[in-house]
Amino acid sequence: TSSAKVTRVTTGYLNDTDPTFDPDGKYLFYASNREFVPVYGSFDNSWTYPNPTRLVAVPLRKDVQSPLYARNDHEAAEPAKKPDDSKDKPAAAPANVEFDLVDFEARSVVLPPPAGNYANLKALKGKLLFRRLPRAGSSDTKSPVLYFDFTERAEKPVLEDADVYEVTSDGKKMLTLLDNRWAILEIKTPQKFEKAIVTADM
């Protein structure tokens, strides 16, 4: 049996799911059912709230600024980084990530993507990758893969439809499933599901 201690970081008042830590150890992202957009039923004569989920970010410590911090759009761009010559060097041991649990949930920031239904949240460097499920009550059938870019403060499409995906450890590619076919795609905009993996001999 494991002796690991489990600590609740949200109150449980809202349904918070699909947590993912960003690779820099600054934020926890999760999906949260918190948007009340009513839809009136034609037969039961009452309201329901079928698309309530928002994407949320929480700075792990009080000294970490909001991922949507106010900034001057006229600031000079950061100088270009020099080419990385550390590819042949062994990877350094990951640093410990510290949490400030006091007022943790009070630091939460609701991200711009609209309320709906989300799955497969995965935090990448500077991005939050997710799958947007069809809105309940709509004629939508596709579940596109997108990411929110924190530098551009914009949502970017990756793939127009997917059943599920898994991201590689370096955060650059994803193994994607669609209609019982698998493909490995780069995480960039846009991608097409064209070259499926041949699985007949596996």
Image (cartoon, helix red, strand yellow):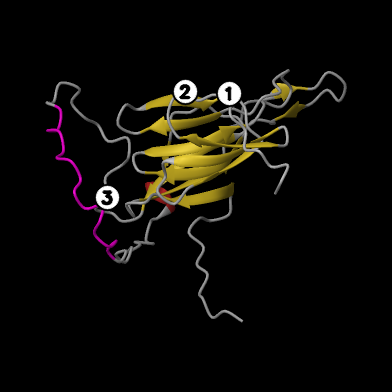
Reading the image, the residue beneath label 2 is 190
Instruction: Looking at this view, name the residue that lies furthest to the right.
Output: 43
Mark 3 crowdedness (10 Å alpha carbons): few <14, some 14-19, many ≥20: few
- Mark 1 and mark 3: span between their CA atoms? 34 Å
Identify the secondary structure beneath mark 3. Answer: loop
Type of amino acid under label 1: Glu
Query: Which residue sits at x=51%, y=63%?
Result: 8
- Mark 3 and mark 2: span between their CA atoms? 31 Å
In the figure, is residue 128 to the left or right of 74? right
> Which quarter of the figure is the N terminus placed in?
bottom right
Q: Residue 90 colored magenta?
A: yes
Reading the image, the residue beneath label 3 is 64
Reading the image, the residue beneath label 1 is 160
Residue 58 vs 148, above or below: the answer is below
Q: Position of residue 126 (x, y in %)?
A: 34, 39
Among numbered discs 2 and 1, the one appearing first in the sequence:
1
Query: Which residue sits at x=28%, y=54%?
Result: 62
Asked if the residues shown at circle 3 and circle 2 are in contact, with their CB atoms under 8 angstroms apart, the answer is no
Asked if the residues shown at circle 2 and circle 1 are in contact, with their CB atoms under 8 angstroms apart, the answer is yes
In the figure, is residue 147 to the left or right of 118? left
Residue 108 seen in the figure: no
Q: Which residues are magenta?
A: 77-92
Identify the secondary structure beneath mark 2. Answer: loop
Query: Which residue sits at x=42%, y=45%?
Result: 171
